[in-house]
Amino acid sequence: MIPIFDLTREYKTINKELNTAFTQTAKSGSFILGQNVSLFEKEFGHFVHTSYAVGLASGTDALTLGLRALGVGNGDEVILPANSYPTAFGVAQSGARIRLVDVKSDGTMNPVSLAHVITRRTRAVVPVHLYGNPADIVSIQKIIGLTKIVLVEDAAQAHGTPSAGSMGDIGCFSFYPTKNLGALGDAGMVVTNRKDVAERLKRLRMYGETKRYESVEVSGVSRLDELQAALLRVKLRHLAEWVASRREIAKQYIEELRGVGDIQFVTDNPKSCYHLFVIRTKRRYALRAYLTARGIGTAIHYPAPIHLVRAFRDLGYKHGDFPVSEALSQEILSIPMFPSLTNGEILRVVRTIKKYFQ
């Protein structure tokens, strides 16, 4: 069996380092917002080239609290791409009204479409670096121009994509276990160059406190766990190497599968960190069944655009409103992608796909 990803292999390669980090944290007796959280925030901020980083409990919380820290909430409109399923939930919980925009063939926000949906109520734009593909932030910034609209980068799938998360007002990251930089549980981060935003986020992640028991606003709790921070510090040291491996695997896939059947590459960008390797084919369901029967794992990221998800029917959109997003949802297929894939496994995936189309 070749899985779509395999976290056990990653653990085996660094288990001694992870076990040491676990033991040291356990012995310290400090489990909430301790030294590891502070150090990981500094190290990750340095990695993405931002002045500040604030650890939170999840990537979804990073979006929700990040928008709140920027002053975005009830009555405001937030624009995001129609195909990024997880992003919608983080934005919706901020209280803002979601507005959708279609995407380009690589799954990232289409700046041309964005220009047509901005209104006087628009307070934030949330481009998503989907699959590790870099969104066109420069073009989006030009469209926003000198308005008061804030730019919130969803970089949850972009650990290792150059500049991802560092160009907007904030960048939101998830450390869900399957990400390029994944915790052994849930964890998230907001990065920013704005001191005021970083300071408010630190309040919002713990009861709105400036000091213990001195709350200046009402908020809940969303803290990056001390143990997860310790483990993430270990993994961060290996991230550049892992991303390089992903790019090599992607290069092999592209070389071997170019021109095979009706396959198109959704992820074909040298700047991508290749969180996923996504192909596109009108024979998606049959190909997936064929691969599954031969022990090759696949996934669909994502099977329905936001406006066709039951939870978001109240947005008022209908089938056909976002044709590129809808077409992608019917044709995309993620094939195995993780740093420890062997050459033999890569060749087996390629040969099986070729055999299907033959």
Image (cartoon, rainbow, N blue to C red):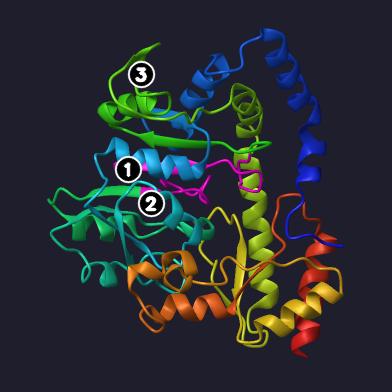
Magenta stretch: includes residue 143: no
**How many labels, in total?**
3
Disc 1, disc 2: CB below 8 Å? yes
> Which residue, given by chain and number where applicable, does mark 2 sit on?
91
Q: Which residues are magenta?
A: 153-182
Q: Position of residue 326 (x, y in %)?
A: 47, 78
Q: Is residue 304 above or below residue 215?
A: below
Q: Position of residue 72 (x, y in %)?
A: 26, 44
Nearer-N-terminus badge (1/2): 1
Left/right of residue 191 with respect to residue 283 in the rendered view: left
Left/right of residue 53 with respect to residue 246 in the rendered view: left
* Distance Cα–Cα, label 1 vs label 2: 8 Å
Mark 1 residue element? helix
Q: Which class describes the residues within 10 Å of circle 2: few (<14), some (14-19), or many (20+)?
A: many
Q: Position of residue 200 (x, y in %)?
A: 31, 27
Q: Is residue 252 above or below residue 202?
A: below
Q: Residue at x 40, y 23 (%)?
A: 207
Nearer-N-terminus badge (1/3): 1
Instruction: Identify which amino acid the numbered label 1 is placed on.
Output: Leu
> Which residue, given by chain and number where applicable, does mark 1 sit on?
67
| Tag of residue 209 | 3
Compare residues 314 and 155 and report the one nearer the observer: 314
Mark 2 residue element? helix
